[in-house]
Image: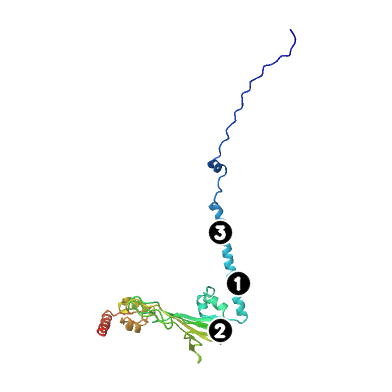
Amino acid sequence: MSDSPDIKPEKKVAPVQAQPIPEVTDQDSADTNPPPQKPTKSVLLPIILGSACIILVLVALSLWNKVEARDEAVMNGENRLTQVQARMDPLLAQVEDAESRVSVINISREMTTDSEGAGRWRGQPGSLNVKKVLEPTTAMAWMVSAAHPLSGLCGGDDASPYSSRFEVGTPNEYQVLLSANARLPAGAVIAYQHGGGAGFEPALLRDPEAVKDDVLDEIVSIARAREKYRVVFTGTVEEYDLEVDVAATDALRQEMIAAKAAQAA
Protein backbone atom coordinates (compact mmCIF):
# COMPACT_ATOMS: atom_id res chain seq x y z
CA MET A 1 0.00 0.00 0.00
CA SER A 2 1.44 3.28 -1.01
CA ASP A 3 1.43 6.39 1.13
CA SER A 4 -0.99 9.17 -0.04
CA PRO A 5 -2.24 12.32 1.66
CA ASP A 6 -5.63 12.22 3.27
CA ILE A 7 -8.21 13.80 1.05
CA LYS A 8 -11.09 15.35 2.96
CA PRO A 9 -14.41 15.31 1.29
CA GLU A 10 -15.73 18.77 0.14
CA LYS A 11 -18.48 20.34 2.21
CA LYS A 12 -21.59 21.29 0.33
CA VAL A 13 -22.43 24.98 0.80
CA ALA A 14 -26.03 25.99 0.41
CA PRO A 15 -26.56 28.70 -2.20
CA VAL A 16 -27.26 32.22 -0.88
CA GLN A 17 -30.67 33.42 -1.85
CA ALA A 18 -31.05 37.10 -2.81
CA GLN A 19 -33.19 39.06 -0.40
CA PRO A 20 -35.90 41.20 -2.01
CA ILE A 21 -35.35 44.97 -1.68
CA PRO A 22 -38.16 46.45 0.32
CA GLU A 23 -40.26 49.00 -1.56
CA VAL A 24 -40.23 52.52 -0.06
CA THR A 25 -43.72 54.02 0.26
CA ASP A 26 -44.93 57.55 0.85
CA GLN A 27 -45.93 56.61 4.36
CA ASP A 28 -42.35 55.46 5.10
CA SER A 29 -41.01 58.77 3.79
CA ALA A 30 -43.45 60.67 6.00
CA ASP A 31 -42.32 58.65 9.01
CA THR A 32 -38.64 59.29 8.38
CA ASN A 33 -39.08 63.01 7.46
CA PRO A 34 -41.84 64.48 9.62
CA PRO A 35 -43.17 67.92 8.55
CA PRO A 36 -41.87 70.94 10.43
CA GLN A 37 -44.01 71.85 13.41
CA LYS A 38 -45.79 75.25 13.66
CA PRO A 39 -44.43 77.66 16.26
CA THR A 40 -46.24 77.30 19.52
CA LYS A 41 -47.96 80.17 21.34
CA SER A 42 -45.03 80.39 23.72
CA VAL A 43 -42.82 81.27 20.73
CA LEU A 44 -45.26 83.72 19.07
CA LEU A 45 -46.05 85.72 22.21
CA PRO A 46 -42.58 87.34 22.59
CA ILE A 47 -42.60 88.21 18.88
CA ILE A 48 -46.00 89.93 19.15
CA LEU A 49 -45.03 91.82 22.30
CA GLY A 50 -41.76 92.92 20.75
CA SER A 51 -43.53 94.25 17.65
CA ALA A 52 -46.07 96.14 19.80
CA CYS A 53 -43.26 97.75 21.81
CA ILE A 54 -41.53 98.90 18.62
CA ILE A 55 -44.77 100.47 17.34
CA LEU A 56 -45.34 102.30 20.64
CA VAL A 57 -41.80 103.66 20.59
CA LEU A 58 -42.24 104.95 17.02
CA VAL A 59 -45.54 106.65 17.92
CA ALA A 60 -43.97 108.25 21.00
CA LEU A 61 -41.04 109.55 18.96
CA SER A 62 -43.42 111.01 16.37
CA LEU A 63 -45.43 112.86 19.03
CA TRP A 64 -42.26 114.10 20.69
CA ASN A 65 -40.96 115.48 17.40
CA LYS A 66 -44.29 117.22 16.89
CA VAL A 67 -44.09 118.85 20.32
CA GLU A 68 -40.51 119.99 19.75
CA ALA A 69 -41.39 121.46 16.35
CA ARG A 70 -44.29 123.40 17.86
CA ASP A 71 -42.22 124.71 20.75
CA GLU A 72 -39.52 125.82 18.31
CA ALA A 73 -42.09 127.62 16.18
CA VAL A 74 -43.40 129.48 19.24
CA MET A 75 -39.89 130.46 20.30
CA ASN A 76 -39.17 131.78 16.78
CA GLY A 77 -42.24 133.99 16.86
CA GLU A 78 -44.29 131.84 14.49
CA ASN A 79 -47.19 131.59 16.93
CA ARG A 80 -50.39 130.56 15.12
CA LEU A 81 -53.69 129.91 16.86
CA THR A 82 -56.26 127.83 14.99
CA GLN A 83 -59.75 127.45 16.37
CA VAL A 84 -60.16 123.89 15.14
CA GLN A 85 -56.66 122.91 16.26
CA ALA A 86 -57.19 124.35 19.72
CA ARG A 87 -60.39 122.33 20.09
CA MET A 88 -59.43 119.07 18.44
CA ASP A 89 -55.65 118.53 18.63
CA PRO A 90 -54.94 115.87 21.28
CA LEU A 91 -51.79 117.75 22.29
CA LEU A 92 -53.95 120.78 23.18
CA ALA A 93 -56.81 118.85 24.74
CA GLN A 94 -56.23 120.31 28.22
CA VAL A 95 -56.58 124.04 28.92
CA GLU A 96 -53.40 124.18 30.99
CA ASP A 97 -51.40 122.44 28.28
CA ALA A 98 -52.75 124.78 25.59
CA GLU A 99 -51.84 127.85 27.63
CA SER A 100 -48.30 126.54 28.20
CA ARG A 101 -47.68 126.06 24.47
CA VAL A 102 -49.57 128.93 22.85
CA SER A 103 -49.71 132.53 24.05
CA VAL A 104 -53.41 132.44 24.79
CA ILE A 105 -55.55 132.46 27.95
CA ASN A 106 -58.84 130.55 28.06
CA ILE A 107 -61.14 133.03 29.76
CA SER A 108 -64.24 130.86 29.91
CA ARG A 109 -66.23 128.08 28.33
CA GLU A 110 -69.80 127.95 29.53
CA MET A 111 -73.04 126.37 28.42
CA THR A 112 -75.34 128.81 26.62
CA THR A 113 -78.88 129.00 28.01
CA ASP A 114 -81.73 128.71 25.45
CA SER A 115 -79.43 127.36 22.72
CA GLU A 116 -81.03 123.89 22.60
CA GLY A 117 -83.29 122.81 19.76
CA ALA A 118 -86.72 122.64 21.42
CA GLY A 119 -88.64 119.39 21.14
CA ARG A 120 -90.26 116.54 23.02
CA TRP A 121 -86.68 115.31 23.22
CA ARG A 122 -84.69 118.50 23.12
CA GLY A 123 -81.21 118.93 21.68
CA GLN A 124 -78.15 119.62 23.80
CA PRO A 125 -77.29 123.26 24.48
CA GLY A 126 -74.34 124.95 22.82
CA SER A 127 -71.38 126.50 24.65
CA LEU A 128 -69.49 129.79 24.38
CA ASN A 129 -65.68 129.52 24.29
CA VAL A 130 -63.83 132.79 25.03
CA LYS A 131 -60.04 133.16 24.57
CA LYS A 132 -57.58 136.02 24.88
CA VAL A 133 -54.28 136.20 23.00
CA LEU A 134 -51.30 137.60 24.90
CA GLU A 135 -49.13 138.62 21.95
CA PRO A 136 -49.68 139.41 18.27
CA THR A 137 -51.09 136.22 16.81
CA THR A 138 -52.37 134.90 13.52
CA ALA A 139 -55.82 133.42 14.12
CA MET A 140 -57.66 131.28 11.61
CA ALA A 141 -61.30 130.22 11.72
CA TRP A 142 -63.82 128.74 9.33
CA MET A 143 -67.49 128.33 10.07
CA VAL A 144 -69.53 125.14 10.09
CA SER A 145 -73.30 124.85 10.67
CA ALA A 146 -73.64 128.63 10.74
CA ALA A 147 -75.99 129.32 7.85
CA HIS A 148 -77.40 125.79 7.96
CA PRO A 149 -77.58 124.45 11.54
CA LEU A 150 -78.77 120.95 12.34
CA SER A 151 -82.40 120.43 11.36
CA GLY A 152 -85.09 119.30 13.80
CA LEU A 153 -86.91 116.05 13.13
CA CYS A 154 -90.63 115.14 13.25
CA GLY A 155 -91.70 118.62 14.35
CA GLY A 156 -88.70 119.43 16.55
CA ASP A 157 -86.97 122.82 16.30
CA ASP A 158 -83.68 123.37 14.49
CA ALA A 159 -80.46 123.65 16.45
CA SER A 160 -78.88 126.98 17.28
CA PRO A 161 -76.16 128.01 14.78
CA TYR A 162 -72.41 128.36 15.27
CA SER A 163 -70.80 131.80 15.28
CA SER A 164 -67.37 133.33 15.82
CA ARG A 165 -66.32 136.89 16.68
CA PHE A 166 -62.84 138.44 16.71
CA GLU A 167 -61.56 141.38 18.80
CA VAL A 168 -64.58 141.24 21.09
CA GLY A 169 -65.28 144.33 23.18
CA THR A 170 -63.35 146.74 20.94
CA PRO A 171 -64.40 149.10 18.12
CA ASN A 172 -62.84 146.60 15.70
CA GLU A 173 -65.09 143.70 16.77
CA TYR A 174 -66.46 141.70 13.85
CA GLN A 175 -68.17 138.40 13.15
CA VAL A 176 -66.57 135.73 10.99
CA LEU A 177 -69.11 134.91 8.29
CA LEU A 178 -67.35 132.17 6.33
CA SER A 179 -63.65 132.08 7.15
CA ALA A 180 -60.92 134.36 8.46
CA ASN A 181 -57.13 134.52 8.57
CA ALA A 182 -56.45 137.59 10.67
CA ARG A 183 -53.53 139.09 12.51
CA LEU A 184 -54.75 139.88 16.02
CA PRO A 185 -53.05 142.36 18.36
CA ALA A 186 -51.98 141.44 21.87
CA GLY A 187 -54.96 141.40 24.21
CA ALA A 188 -57.51 140.56 21.49
CA VAL A 189 -60.45 138.41 22.58
CA ILE A 190 -62.00 135.64 20.48
CA ALA A 191 -65.51 134.33 21.21
CA TYR A 192 -66.60 131.09 19.54
CA GLN A 193 -70.22 130.03 19.96
CA HIS A 194 -70.73 126.29 19.52
CA GLY A 195 -74.18 125.44 18.20
CA GLY A 196 -76.61 123.19 20.03
CA GLY A 197 -78.41 120.01 19.03
CA ALA A 198 -81.72 119.79 17.19
CA GLY A 199 -85.04 118.75 18.75
CA PHE A 200 -87.15 115.69 18.04
CA GLU A 201 -90.96 115.91 17.88
CA PRO A 202 -92.97 119.03 18.92
CA ALA A 203 -91.95 120.85 22.07
CA LEU A 204 -95.59 120.82 23.31
CA LEU A 205 -95.18 117.08 23.94
CA ARG A 206 -92.28 117.49 26.36
CA ASP A 207 -93.02 116.48 29.95
CA PRO A 208 -93.51 119.69 31.99
CA GLU A 209 -91.45 118.19 34.82
CA ALA A 210 -88.57 117.67 32.40
CA VAL A 211 -88.89 121.33 31.37
CA LYS A 212 -88.72 122.30 35.05
CA ASP A 213 -85.48 120.32 35.43
CA ASP A 214 -84.09 122.11 32.37
CA VAL A 215 -84.91 125.48 33.95
CA LEU A 216 -83.25 124.51 37.24
CA ASP A 217 -80.19 123.31 35.29
CA GLU A 218 -80.09 126.68 33.44
CA ILE A 219 -80.51 124.97 30.07
CA VAL A 220 -83.83 126.71 29.43
CA SER A 221 -85.00 130.06 30.80
CA ILE A 222 -88.45 130.58 32.31
CA ALA A 223 -89.37 132.83 29.39
CA ARG A 224 -88.37 130.18 26.82
CA ALA A 225 -90.17 127.48 28.81
CA ARG A 226 -93.36 129.45 28.39
CA GLU A 227 -92.75 130.49 24.77
CA LYS A 228 -91.52 127.17 23.31
CA TYR A 229 -92.79 124.48 25.66
CA ARG A 230 -95.91 126.28 26.95
CA VAL A 231 -95.05 125.47 30.57
CA VAL A 232 -96.06 127.83 33.40
CA PHE A 233 -94.37 127.84 36.81
CA THR A 234 -94.97 129.10 40.30
CA GLY A 235 -92.10 130.09 42.57
CA THR A 236 -88.61 131.15 41.48
CA VAL A 237 -85.28 129.59 40.59
CA GLU A 238 -83.51 131.77 43.14
CA GLU A 239 -85.59 130.40 46.02
CA TYR A 240 -85.48 126.90 44.55
CA ASP A 241 -89.22 126.54 45.02
CA LEU A 242 -90.05 126.28 41.32
CA GLU A 243 -93.11 124.13 40.59
CA VAL A 244 -95.19 123.41 37.48
CA ASP A 245 -98.57 125.12 37.43
CA VAL A 246 -100.43 122.16 35.94
CA ALA A 247 -103.74 123.96 35.26
CA ALA A 248 -102.14 127.00 33.64
CA THR A 249 -99.80 124.76 31.58
CA ASP A 250 -102.69 122.64 30.26
CA ALA A 251 -104.69 125.76 29.37
CA LEU A 252 -101.75 127.36 27.58
CA ARG A 253 -101.01 124.19 25.60
CA GLN A 254 -104.64 123.75 24.58
CA GLU A 255 -104.67 127.35 23.42
CA MET A 256 -101.64 126.70 21.22
CA ILE A 257 -103.15 123.49 19.82
CA ALA A 258 -106.38 125.31 18.97
CA ALA A 259 -104.46 128.15 17.29
CA LYS A 260 -102.49 125.71 15.13
CA ALA A 261 -105.70 123.87 14.17
CA ALA A 262 -107.36 127.12 13.14
CA GLN A 263 -104.31 128.13 11.14
CA ALA A 264 -104.25 124.77 9.33
CA ALA A 265 -107.94 125.08 8.47
- Nearest the viewer among 41 and 113 is 41
Cβ atoms at labels 1 and 3 below 8 Å apart: no
Which residue in the protein does label 2 denote? 138
Cβ atoms at labels 2 and 1 below 8 Å apart: no
Q: Residue at x 56, y 59 (%)?
A: 49
Residue 172 location (% of width, % of height): 51, 91
Q: CA distance from mark 1 to mark 3?
A: 25 Å
Mark number, residue 49: 3
Screen quadrant of the C terminus: bottom left
Reply above or below: 47 against 99.
Answer: above
Q: Residue at x 60, y 75 (%)?
A: 69
Along the polypeptide, which appears first: circle 2 or circle 1?
1
Query: Tag 2, which secondary structure?
Result: strand
Amino acid, disc 1:
Asn
Amino acid, disc 3:
Leu
Answer with the quarter of the image where residue 13 lies.
top right
- Nearest the viewer among 197 and 254 is 197
Q: Residue at x 57, y 77 (%)?
A: 101
Amino acid, disc 2:
Thr
Along the polypeptide, which appears first: circle 3 or circle 2?
3
Which residue in the protein does label 1 denote? 65
Reply above or below: 130 against 29.
Answer: below
